[in-house]
Image (spheres, coloured by chain):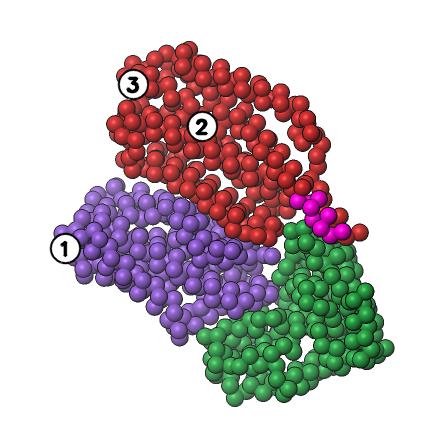
C-alpha cells in the first residue's frame, strides 16, 4: 500500500492551497513586504518614470527573493510548530512527493506575489513587465528560488538559529539564478535582440533543472531523523 | 512470528545513549503499556518504531518488514498519536481527515464514511466542519486519535494519549482503546499513569534509562503493585 | 555493555593518525620543498610577460590556488555523498578539512587576483561576473561554517552539512564555467580561449607553461592533501577526546 507520487504531492499542495486561501497568512505577509520593499527602493534609488531599466529589473528580483525567504520561513515554521511534518513523514509516501507538494505551494504563492510586484512596478515606473517572455523569466526565476528555498528551509528549521540562517545559506546559492533572471529581464525590457537574452533564459532553465533534481534527491536526507 | 520485533536496538543522540540494546517482541493483538519516567526513552522508542527516527544500531522488524529499508510498507500499517496533535489548524476537522485519507491513498467515499463514524464515536460529529484552531486541547487530542485510526492500521502507537484530556475525554479514549483491542489491533502505549496501564494493557513494560527493567503480563499486577515496583526500580 | 562503549572510537593507527606520523611528516617536508621550487620557478625560471611585466607572475599562484580549492572542495562533495550513503562519521570528518582547506585556497585565489588586478585593471575590485561568482562561492562556504555551528545534534549536523556541501559545489562549477558562458566578462581564461573582451590575457611560452604546470600540480595535489591530512588528524583526535569524555561522564 504505497501512495503514488503524484497523488501524494497533489494532496499536500491542495491542503496548503486550501489553508492559505482561508488564512491568507503567507500571501498577505509576502505581498505587504514586497510592496514596502518596492517603495523603499524607489525612494532610496530615486527611481522615477525614466528610471533605468537595469535598476527596475534589479528591484523586481531582489524584492521577489526577499519576499520568498519571508514566505518560506513562515511556511516551514507553520509545519514545524504543529509538528505537522511528522504527519507527512508517517504516511506511506515517497519523500520526494513531500518535497514536490510543499514546493508547488511555495511556488504558487511566491509567483502570485511576484506577479503583483511586476504589476506595481509596471504602474509606478511605466515599464511594460507583462509580455510572454518576461512572464517566462518570472516563472523560471521564482521556480528556482522556491526549489532552493524549500530544500534549505526544511534544513534550517532543524537548526538553532532557524529564521536567521535561511537567508545566509540560501542567498549565495540563489545568486546564479538571480544573475540570470536579472540579466534576462533587463535585456528583454531594453528590447535587445533575442540572441542577447535567450542564453540567459537557457542558463536559468538549466539551473532550475539542476536544483530540482538535487532537491528531489537530497530532501530525503534533510527530513529524516 | 511476532508482529513487532526489535533486536539490540540502540539509539544515541551524539554520545548520549537513549535506548540501549533493546530486544523486544510484541505479538499480534497484544496491548502493551510502556511505563517510565520522563527521559527514559519511551518517546524515542515509539518514534523509531513508527519510522520517524532512525536507529543508531540494531534491527526493527514489523510485520516481517524491516526498517528502514521497507519503511513505506510499514508506515501503511501504523497509526500514531504523538505529543503534538499533528493537525492543520486552518482546516476543518473534516478537511483534515480528507487530507489524511489522500495521504494514505484511501478511497474518498469510503474514507468519508469511516471518518464520519469515527467522529461520531469520539463525540466530534457536530464540530466536523469547524476549524481545528477553534478546538480545545482535548478535542484536538480526540481528533488526532481519529486520524491515527483512519486508515485502519494493524498497529497503534500511542505516546501519552491521555495528556490534556478531561475526565470525559479520558473515558472516551479508554473506550476507544478497548474497542481497538477488541478489533484485534496491536497497541503500544507510552504512559506514566499506572491506572490506565493496569486497566487497558495485557502486558506491562517499564523502561528505565533506555533499558527494559520489567516485562510482565498485566494480569499479574494491579496499579498499586505497579506503582510500588516502579518506585522501587527507579530509586534502585 | 553500554551504548557509549559501543560507540566506535576513531582509529588512532595507520601512518596518519599515530602519535608520530612519520610518513605525514615526510610528505609535509616534500611538499614544502616542492612549494619553494614552484615559487622559484614562477619568480625566476618562467620568462617575463612582455605586456604585463613582473606582476603576471602572480598568475602561477592565482590559478593554482583555484585549482587546489576546486580539488579540495570536490573531495568534500565525494566525502559528503559517501557519508549520506554509508552513514559512517569518518566521511563527515574528512569533509570538514576539505571545506576548510578549499575555503582558504579560494580566499588566496581571490586575494592574489586582487593584487594582480590593481595594476592591470587599475582597480582592486570590479563587479565582473567572475569576481562576483568567486566571492559568492567563498560566501557559500562561509555559510557552510555557520550551518555547521548552528546544529547541536552531531548526527543532524553531519547529515545537513553533507547535503549543503553537495549543493555548495554548484557555485564552484558556476565560477569555473562563467567566463566561458558569459561574454561580458573581462576576466581572461588561462586555460582555453579567452573571452573577446578579456583584458590582461597572455600567451604561455614553454618556460611559462612549465612553471604553470609545476605549480598547478603542487597546489592542487600536494598542498591540499597535506593540509587536509593534518587537519583531519586534529579532527580525529578531538573526536577521540569527546568519546573518552562521554565515557568518563557515564561512569
Residue lying at 54% horizontally and 24% vertically, measured from the top left: C222
- Front-most of residues C165 and B207: B207
Separation of marks 2 and 3 at Cα, in angstroms: 20 Å
Quarter of the image that includes the C terminus of chain B = bottom right
| Tally of numbered tags | 3
Residue A49: assigned label: 1
- Front-most of residues A101 and C190: C190
In the picture, measured across the screen, residue A4 lies left or right of residue A67, that is: right
- Front-most of residues B198 and B208: B208
Residue at the disc numbered 3: C52
Residue B48 visible? The answer is yes
Residue at the disc numbered 2: C65
Q: Which secondary structure lies at badge 2?
A: helix
Mark 2 neighbour class, 10 Å CA radius: few under 14, some 14 to 19, many 20 or more: many
Residue A73: percent from left, percent from top: 43, 60
Q: Which secondary structure lies at badge 1?
A: loop
Separation of marks 2 and 1 at Cα, in angstroms: 47 Å
- Mark 2 falls within which chain? C
Mark 3 neighbour class, 10 Å CA radius: few under 14, some 14 to 19, many 20 or more: some
- Mark 3 falls within which chain? C
In the picture, measured across the screen, residue B165 lies left or right of residue A113, that is: right
**Chain B colour as displayed:** green
Q: Can marks 2 and 3 be said to lie on one chain?
A: yes
Residue lying at 42% horizontally and 11% vertically, measured from the top left: C45
In the picture, measured across the screen, residue C16 lies left or right of residue A135, that is: right
Residue A216 visible? The answer is no
**Chain A colour as displayed:** purple
Residue B55: percent from left, percent from top: 68, 56
Residue range in magenta is: C242-251
Q: Which chain is red?
A: C
Any magenta on residue C250? Answer: yes
Amino acid at each position: 500500500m504505497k501512495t503514488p507520487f503524484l497523488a501524494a504531492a497533489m494532496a499536500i499542495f491542495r491542503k496548503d492551497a486550501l489553508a492559505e486561501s482561508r488564512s491568507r497568512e503567507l500571501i498577505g505577509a509576502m505581498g505587504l513586504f514586497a510592496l514596502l520593499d518596492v517603495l523603499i527602493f524607489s525612494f532610496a534609488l530615486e527611481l522615477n518614470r525614466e528610471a533605468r531599466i537595469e535598476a527596475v529589473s534589479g528591484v523586481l528580483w531582489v524584492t521577489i527573493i526577499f519576499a520568498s525567504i519571508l514566505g518560506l520561513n513562515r511556511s516551514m515554521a507553520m509545519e514545524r510548530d504543529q509538528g505537522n511534518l511528522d504527519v507527512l513523514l508517517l504516511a506511506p509516501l515517497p519523500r520526494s512527493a513531500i518535497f514536490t507538494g510543499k514546493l508547488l505551494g511555495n511556488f504558487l504563492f511566491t509567483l502570485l506575489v511576484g506577479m503583483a510586484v511586476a504589476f506595481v512596478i509596471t504602474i509606478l515606473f511605466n515599464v511594460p513587465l507583462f509580455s510572454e517572455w518576461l512572464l517566462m523569466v518570472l516563472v523560471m526565476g521564482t521556480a528556482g528560488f522556491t526549489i532552493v528555498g524549500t530544500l534549505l528551509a526544511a534544513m534550517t528549521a532543524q537548526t538553532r538559529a532557524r529564521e536567521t540562517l535561511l537567508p545566509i545559506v540560501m542567498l549565495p546559492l540563489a545568486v546564479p539564478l538571480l544573475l540570470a533572471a536579472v540579466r534576462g529581464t533587463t535585456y528583454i525590457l531594453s528590447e535587445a535582440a533575442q540572441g542577447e537574452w535567450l542564453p540567459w533564459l537557457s542558463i536559468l532553465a538549466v539551473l532550475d533543472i539542476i536544483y530540482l533534481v538535487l532537491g528531489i534527491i537530497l530532501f530525503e536526507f534533510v527530513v529524516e531523523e | 512470528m511476532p508482529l513487532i520485533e526489535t533486536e539490540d536496538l540502540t539509539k544515541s543522540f551524539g554520545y548520549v545513549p537513549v535506548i540501549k540494546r533493546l530486544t523486544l517482541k510484541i505479538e499480534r493483538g497484544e496491548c502493551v503499556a510502556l511505563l517510565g519516567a520522563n527521559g527514559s526513552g519511551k518517546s524515542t522508542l515509539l518514534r523509531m518504531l513508527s519510522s520517524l527516527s532512525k536507529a543508531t544500531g540494531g534491527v526493527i522488524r514489523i510485520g516481517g518488514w524491516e526498517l528502514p529499508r521497507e519503511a513505506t510498507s510499514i508506515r501503511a500499517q501504523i497509526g500514531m498519536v504523538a505529543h503534538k496533535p499533528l493537525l492543520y489548524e486552518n482546516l476543518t476537522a473534516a478537511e483534515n481527515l480528507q487530507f489524511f485519507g489522500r495521504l494514505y491513498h484511501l478511497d474518498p467515499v469510503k474514507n468519508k464514511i469511516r471518518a464520519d463514524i469515527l467522529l461520531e464515536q469520539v463525540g466530534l460529529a457536530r464540530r466536523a466542519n469547524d476549524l481545528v484552531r477553534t478546538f480545545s486541547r482535548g478535542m484536538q487530542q480526540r481528533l488526532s486519535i481519529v486520524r491515527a485510526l483512519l486508515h485502519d492500521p494493524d498497529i497503534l502507537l500511542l505516546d501519552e494519549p491521555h495528556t490534556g484530556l478531561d475526565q470525559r475525554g479520558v473515558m472516551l479514549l479508554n473506550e476507544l482503546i478497548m474497542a481497538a483491542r477488541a478489533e484485534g489491533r496491536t497497541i503500544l502505549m507510552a504512559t506514566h499513569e499506572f491506572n490506565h496501564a493496569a486497566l487497558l494493557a495485557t502486558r506491562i513494560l517499564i523502561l528505565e534509562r533506555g533499558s527494559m527493567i520489567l516485562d510482565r503480563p498485566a494480569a499479574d499486577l494491579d496499579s498499586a503493585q505497579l506503582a510500588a515496583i516502579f518506585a522501587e526500580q527507579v530509586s534502585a | 555493555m553500554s551504548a557509549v562503549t559501543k560507540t566506535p572510537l576513531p582509529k588512532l593507527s595507520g601512518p596518519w593518525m599515530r602519535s608520530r606520523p612519520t610518513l605525514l611528516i615526510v610528505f609535509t617536508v616534500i611538499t614544502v620543498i616542492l612549494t619553494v621550487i614552484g615559487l622559484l620557478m614562477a619568480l625566476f625560471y618562467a620568462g617575463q610577460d612582455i605586456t604585463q611585466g613582473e606582476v603576471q607572475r602572480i598568475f602561477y599562484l592565482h590559478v593554482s590556488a583555484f585549482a587546489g580549492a576546486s580539488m579540495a572542495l570536490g573531495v568534500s562533495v565525494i566525502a559528503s555523498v559517501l557519508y549520506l550513503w554509508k552513514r559512517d562519521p569518518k566521511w563527515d570528518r574528512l569533509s570538514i578539512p576539505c571545506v576548510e582547506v578549499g575555503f582558504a585556497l579560494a580566499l588566496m585565489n581571490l586575494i592574489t587576483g586582487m593584487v594582480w588586478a590593481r595594476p592591470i585593471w587599475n582597480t582592486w575590485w570590479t563587479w565582473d561576473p567572475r569576481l562576483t561568482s568567486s566571492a559568492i562561492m567563498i560566501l557559500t562556504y562561509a555559510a557552510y561554517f555557520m550551518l555547521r555551528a548552528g546544529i547541536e545534534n552531531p548526527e543532524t549536523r553531519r547529515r545537513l552539512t553533507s547535503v549543503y556541501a553537495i549543493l555548495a559545489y554548484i557555485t564552484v562549477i558556476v565560477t569555473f564555467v562563467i567566463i566561458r558562458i558569459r561574454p561580458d566578462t573581462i576576466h581572461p581564461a588561462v586555460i582555453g580561449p579567452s573571452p573577446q573582451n578579456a583584458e590582461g590575457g597572455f600567451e604561455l611560452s614553454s618556460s611559462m607553461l612549465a612553471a604553470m604546470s609545476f605549480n598547478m600540480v603542487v597546489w592542487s595535489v600536494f598542498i591540499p592533501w597535506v593540509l587536509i591530512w593534518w587537519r583531519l588528524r586534529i579532527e580525529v583526535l578531538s573526536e577521540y577526546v569527546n568519546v573518552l569524555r562521554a565515557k568518563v561522564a557515564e561512569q
